Amino acid sequence: MNCQEVMELMQRELDHDLDDSEQAAMKAHLQQCSECAEMFARLQRLSQELANLPKVTPPFSLVDSILPQLAEVDRAGEGPIAAAAVSAPKTKHANAPAAQLPSKRSVRSRTMRRLATASGVVAAGLLMVLVMNQLDGGMGKVADDTALMPQSGGSMSTTFSANEASGVGESSAMAVEKRMAMSESAKIESMSGEGATAADTVVPKSAEPQTTKSQSPASQPSDAMQLPGARQPETSPPVAAQPTAPPSIASESPSIQALPSASEDSNIARSAGVAQSVPEIAPTDPAAADSPLKTDTGLPSSVDGGKAADQSGIVSDGSPSVAPNDAQKYVNSPAEGEESSSVKSTNPQEMDVADRSSGAEDTQLGASNTVMEEPEMAGFTVPSPEVEQLVSEDGLLVAALDRGNRRIAITTADSKQAERYVSAAWKEQQQPKLIGWKGSTELTYSLTDVDGKTTTIVIDIGNRTETIREP
Amino acid sequence: MVAQQLIKAAQAGDRDALITLLREIETHVYRTAYYILGNEPDAKDAAQEALIRIYTKINSYEEKAQFKTWVQRIVTNICIDKFRRTKSTVSIEEHDMVFTSDNSVEDEMMSSFVAKDIQEAIDRLPEHHRTVVVLRYMQDFSYNEIADSLDLPLNTVKSYLYRARQQLQTLLRDYQKGGVRG
């Protein structure tokens, strides 16, 4: 045995890794070789010193120091707490869409084949697109719109992870399918015969989910039938779809095609979700129950006329996204979709706006919807009316829910409305509620997840901090 | 070191369980970071980052691995990243070797003097060698546990550890001969 080999034995001896015979062999060598014996003594001392290094401890509780960040993680929906709330614990929702992509693709191609066979109906639908386009500024628009589509796609992928982006794409694929279904219901009221040729030219584009947008509102009934397939994919995409919607809307204000389609998709999916995954809601709520009928008859519902206006207002503000999981909207949404269709037939411009804005909302609704698939969430019903603003006890400050940005803005209550604090953004699926002021220094609010889990948060205006209040 | 039950609860979305879990491991996480990075501020940063990551990723922990090696993998990865980003600008003299140890007796002076030398010597090891030494001595990990934590083959772990000890031994002998610190 040479010194090199003994070196290894010595090292292993330090880690108590030698058996008896190896130990004996090493000792025998050390007795003969003073150099190795000296080395071993040094190594032993070193090992001892290493083992005796101070057991340093953090100077303060690191966990305490990161509690705010952990709360932020929860609220951003990145942590297990949020994940558990949104989906089943082990599901990595980010991955889900990607995994599902292939199957959806096939759904999509199947859809397209069906689309081809049903071309008559589809042509009618396309006609409507066309008509709208013409109203909206002529044939050239169609081309413009298609040109825009890649752009909006691009912006998505830059803003979001590939998975999310693909999720968006999928949801639009779903939309095609739904539109198909919808074309059967043939609600395409405003169509005129002249569109036929035009429709043909558009057909290739109709293959792209995006082009078909205009028909969606009609489709509620058939959507419901499609739902089993549709629901699954919806799960995560809406989350991604929602944020993307506003930017593209802003960028291409006159032409609707590219974006609205996505929004519609989720619109459809959402209404389907309402109808099916939460059966309890549809029957009980008159609006939801009625809407399919209305759409079928093609009667514009005057009920929601105001809403369309509201939405268009939102869009022109450039912040189309409305608070997501407003259950009221949930329930109303079918009606909304329908109403936008009625608007469509009369006033294309306005319709576009309404369409889009409802789309933005829809995506969010879609997101909440998926959550509702979970059995225990089926009972989710209309929330109590919310306080949108809350003035502090001394009347100096006012807190307002800014649903567009999913934040609470605290401003001075005077005419200047100087901004004093803006809360962290809540998640799309969360339901904010202003609870109360303590003087004008602390505002308490809560965020309720779709599963009913409520987090209470206290904003300290003076210190500009937000703390989660432990239950 | 950490009950599986607690981990399960944490993974199921029990926030309190997860926080408790973090409290149980924070010292281990900090200690590793401290000895890899060689100073308190960096160690705090790295440990906090690791704890947040553990909090966020708790669901990616699978029972087939030991929880402690999973935790150490996270913290050592963060430390190595951090080390690569900052180390080049830090010289040995800038290290602040203050130990926050509870026993404040006189022999602490002696031991901390030795510890200082050792710590400095550790700092001069290549990052993987240092990490192996830290896991071996500060976490009492076995070869296998180190291999799991660092995702290294067992033989690599051994050779890193042996070489590290040899190198440390050489460095310390130089110090003791009145070397570097003067």
Image: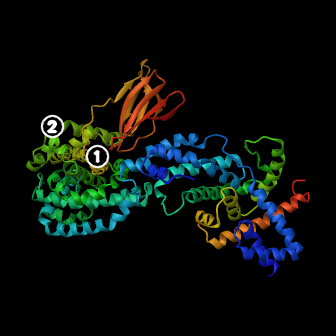
Chain to which the residue tagged by mark 1 belongs? A
Q: Residue at x 48, y 60 (%)?
A: B63
Residue A254 spot, x, y in % from top left: 29, 49
Tell which subunit mark 2 falls on: A
Q: Amino acid at mark 1?
A: Met
Q: Is residue A428 above or below residue A13?
A: above
* Position in image of residue A318 (x %, y %): 36, 42
Identity, as a three-letter code, of the amino acid under mark 2: Val
Would residue B138 appear left or right of A245 to someone viewing this image?
Answer: right
Report crowding for label 1: few under 14, some 14 to 19, many 20 or more residues within 10 A (C-alpha).
some
In the current view of this chain or complex, which residue is farthest to the left? Answer: A297
Does A116 sit left or right of A318 as displayed?
left
The answer to which quarter of the image holds residue B161 is bottom right
Q: Is residue A440 above or below residue A280?
A: above
Q: CA distance from mark 1 to mark 2?
A: 29 Å
* In this view, the mark in front (1 or 2): 1
- Residue A303 disc label: 2
The answer, for residue A140, to whether it is visible in the render is no
**Residue in the picture at 72% in, 73% down:** A20
User: Relative to the observer, which residue lies in front, A230 or A33?
Assistant: A33
Residue B170 is at least partly visible in this image: yes
In the displayed image of the protein, which residue is found farthest to the bottom?
A1
User: Would you name the residue on which mark 1 appears?
Assistant: A377
Viewer-proximal residue among A417 and B161: B161
